[in-house]
Image: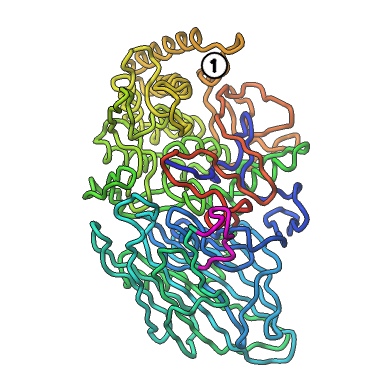
């Protein structure tokens, strides 16, 4: 279960309403924020950089550091280890650092978040002007760090030093008390220098787990003067270890006081180069950190892929992100902050879209066991729940993020996420129809198994969430309505039928139509029947009925329609607050199907954009302040709201009481940013 912030939910539901999370907003910023381009594709900040996290992300890797350009220990699932360079399900490095002529490059004076990259303005070092650009090419298991050195004077040479500190470890197991196996058993890394690159390996097995062969490489396309290996190589950082049990924890210490966590077993290395700099000119050196959880041969392939024409790869990355930005153009003259949030929300979703291969699906029972896998998912795609501590796969997050994803035209990512949930859930739960809740990118399932136990007081404890199972058909229907993709609907249809059939058969002991089990709010003491589960169940039945009708499945259509009407009537007559039914509207059946085409660039006659149409041809994809378009779908978009400060991603405030959380200090910070 989770205490994550839902960065993936950033964005809009353009047909009805908009929820803002995540990125700094260009027109609502404190001192130190500024928009760097007229088009709004960059945002910059110059205050408290050491306290703000940032991420450069691709589909197969991501790099989490801080906006001053340093890499501090942060995160709580594996204490202090959730930052650094990752290629799911494997962490590669704690960080990388640069020096010139024996001087370490200092903390950044300005940080810029761009669409598909991050950039750091660094202080003058050894008489040279320095900037750093980070990005992760999509499809590559590695990150690139481009150090641009500008020489204001006569032609000269400079000595470039590069430090890297390894930390080869999996995303699971985690490190808090009671988990078996545990991150505290993390094996030590070994390092070597092969004449061109730093090599790091971790071969062995944690207690009770299969053998692994982790590998990472750090290097450039240049020939180094020298290379060294040793634990002491942390660049300008002292290598200070924080345990998470210091006085004042978890609010203190701040990440900038910590370089490693208690489970760190990495080593370090340093490369040196001699660079020739032209008079009044610049030179960019691209450093790559790449790796694999299948051994050194695969890591070498990834390093070579990363270093192949880095400038061209950066241009391609920026182009792909611009293409995402061009979808679902929104004009809100009266609310520019919201309009900007939509643009950055598109980038949020893209940054959180990840893939991994060969997930070994096993039920860990909230970390109490590590059995043999039940099967393998060959390839998974998902939209992560949030950096740094929840970058993996969730059920309820996908079901909510679907609203944002379809409204901005990012169909493939959310389709992939729902397909992944179906495949994982069917392996885990033997095709019962129960939807898995939390799946790490190696296939370890923390919560979401079709099992339950009877408590001494007669109540039942469930190992899955009812709300995720009853919401799933609605998520499928939402995507189908927006895309018109009958093939996707047909591929998911059997699973959605099993979702609701399971609920009726197994989660309604008193036959009142109100499902038992855990709901969206992860708190104990709420009773066996949750309001949200019933609302989502009614809506799910209506959505299943629509899909059944389209497929000419008369039996399922009749069953779902009749049951939805019956439960809704009982619900309306049962739950009344101050003379009103407070959530009745969320159970309303949609009246039309909206189709959002892939081509989202047809100018409207009034200067806006007409990007999607309802079944009657009415425009539903262009929003005007305080206007409601005729013929718009009557779908109610369910969303969480939070107070957002510029430059901040709100924390998710829900957490299971039996799971330790870290809401501040080293483990989480109130100035987190999910940046490009």
Q: Is 623 on the left or on the right of 247, as rendered?
A: right
Whether residue 546 is visible here, answered yes or no, is no
Residue 341 drawn at (x, y percent):
66, 44
Q: Please identify the residue farthest to the front as the structure is shown.
A: 247
Q: How many marks do you count on the picture? A: 1
Question: Which of these two is toward me, 271 or 175?
Answer: 175
Give the x, y percent position of residue 311. 57, 71
Query: Residue at horizontal 55%, vertical 83%?
Result: 161
Q: Residue at x 28, y 51 (%)?
A: 360
From what the image shows, is residue 329 above or below residue 250?
above
> Which quadrant is home to the C terminus?
bottom right
Which residue corresponds to the image point at 30% horizontal and 65% vertical from the top-left?
294
* Front position in the image: 378 or 595: 378
Q: Main secondary structure of the magenta part?
A: loop
Crowding at label 1, few (<14), some or many (≥20) Cα neighbours within 10 Å? Answer: some
SS at mark 1 in the image: helix
Question: Where is mark 1, residue-wise?
Answer: 584
| Residue 644 image position (x, y, % from top left) | 66, 43
Q: Going by the image, does 220 lie left or right of 26?
A: left
- Assess whether residue 636 is covered by the magenta stretch: no
Q: Is residue 257 magenta?
A: yes
Magenta residues, start to end? 246-259
Question: Residue 319 appears in which quarter of the rendering?
Answer: bottom right
Quarter of the image with the N terminus is top left
* Residue 192, x across and y down, in percent: 37, 81
């Amino acid at each position: 279960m989770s205490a994550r912030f839902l960065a993936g939910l950033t964005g809009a539901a353009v047909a009805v309403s908009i929820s803002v999370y995540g990125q700094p907003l260009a027109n609502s910023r404190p001192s130190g924020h500024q928009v760097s381009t007229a088009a709004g594709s960059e945002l910059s900040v110059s205050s408290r950089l050491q306290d703000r996290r940032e991420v450069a992300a691709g589909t197969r890797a991501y790099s989490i550091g801080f906006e001053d350009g340093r890499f501090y220990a942060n995160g709580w699932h594996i204490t202090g280890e959730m930052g650094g360079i990752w290629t799911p399900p494997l962490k590669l490095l704690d960080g990388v650092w640069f020096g010139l002529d024996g001087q370490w490059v200092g903390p950044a004076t300005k940080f810029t978040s761009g669409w598909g990259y991050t950039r750091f303005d660094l202080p003058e070092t050894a008489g040279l002007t320095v900037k750093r650009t980070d990005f992760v090419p999509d499809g590559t298991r590695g990150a690139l760090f481009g150090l641009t050195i500008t020489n204001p004077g006569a032609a000269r040479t400079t000595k470039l030093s590069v430090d890297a500190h390894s930390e080869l470890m999996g995303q699971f197991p985690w490190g808090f008390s009671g988990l078996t196996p545990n991150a505290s058993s993390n094996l030590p890394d070994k390092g070597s220098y092969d004449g061109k690159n730093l090599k790091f390996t971790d071969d062995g097995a944690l207690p009770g787990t299969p053998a692994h062969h982790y590998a990472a490489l750090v290097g450039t396309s240049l020939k180094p003067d020298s290379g060294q290996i040793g634990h002491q190589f942390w660049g300008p950082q002292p290598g200070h270890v924080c345990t998470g049990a210091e006085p004042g924890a978890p609010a203190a210490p701040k990440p900038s006081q910590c370089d490693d966590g208690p489970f760190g077993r990495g080593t370090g290395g340093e490369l040196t180069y001699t660079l020739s700099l032209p008079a009044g000119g610049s030179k960019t050196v691209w450093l790559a950190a790449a790796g694999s959880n299948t051994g050194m041969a695969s890591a070498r392939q990834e390093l070579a892929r990363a270093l192949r024409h880095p400038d061209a790869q950066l241009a391609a990355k920026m182009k792909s992100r611009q293409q995402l930005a061009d979808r679902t153009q929104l004009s809100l003259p009266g609310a520019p902050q919201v309009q900007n949030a939509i643009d950055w929300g598109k980038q949020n979703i893209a940054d959180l879209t990840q893939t991994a291969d060969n997930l070994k699906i096993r039920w860990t029972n909230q970390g109490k066991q590590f059995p043999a896998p039940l099967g393998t998912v060959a390839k998974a795609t998902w939209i992560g729940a949030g950096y740094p501590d929840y970058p993996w796969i969730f059920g309820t997050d996908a079901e909510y993020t679907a609203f944002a994803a379809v409204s901005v035209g990012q169909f493939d990512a959310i389709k992939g996420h729902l397909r992944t949930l179906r495949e994982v859930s069917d392996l885990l739960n033997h095709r019962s129809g129960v939807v898995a809740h939390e799946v790490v990118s190696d296939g370890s399932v923390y919560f979401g198994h079709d099992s339950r136990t009877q408590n001494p007081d007669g109540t039942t404890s469930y190992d899955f969430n009812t709300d995720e199972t009853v919401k799933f058909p609605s998520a499928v229907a939402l995507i189908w309505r927006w895309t018109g993709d009958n093939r996707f609907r047909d591929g998911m249809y059997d699973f959605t039928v099993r979702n609701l059939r399971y609920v009726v058969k197994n989660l309604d002991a008193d036959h009142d139509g109100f499902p038992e089990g855990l709901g969206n709010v992860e708190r104990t003491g709420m009773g066996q029947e949750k309001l949200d589960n019933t609302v989502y169940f009614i809506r799910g039945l209506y959505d299943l009925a629509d899909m059944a009708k389209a497929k000419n499945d008369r039996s399922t259509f009749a069953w779902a329609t009749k049951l939805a009407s019956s439960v809704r009537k009982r619900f309306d007559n049962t739950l009344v607050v101050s003379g009103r039914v407070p959530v009745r509207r969320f159970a309303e059946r949609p009246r039309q199907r909206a189709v959002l085409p892939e081509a989202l660039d047809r100018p409207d006659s009034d200067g806006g954009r007409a990007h999607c149409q309802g079944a009657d041809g009415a425009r539903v994809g262009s929003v005007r302040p305080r206007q409601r378009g005729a013929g718009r779908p009557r779908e109610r978009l369910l969303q969480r709201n939070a107070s957002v400060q510029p430059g901040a991603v709100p924390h998710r405030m829900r957490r299971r009481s039996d799971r330790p959380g870290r809401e501040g200090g080293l483990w989480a910070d109130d100035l987190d940013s999910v940046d490009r």
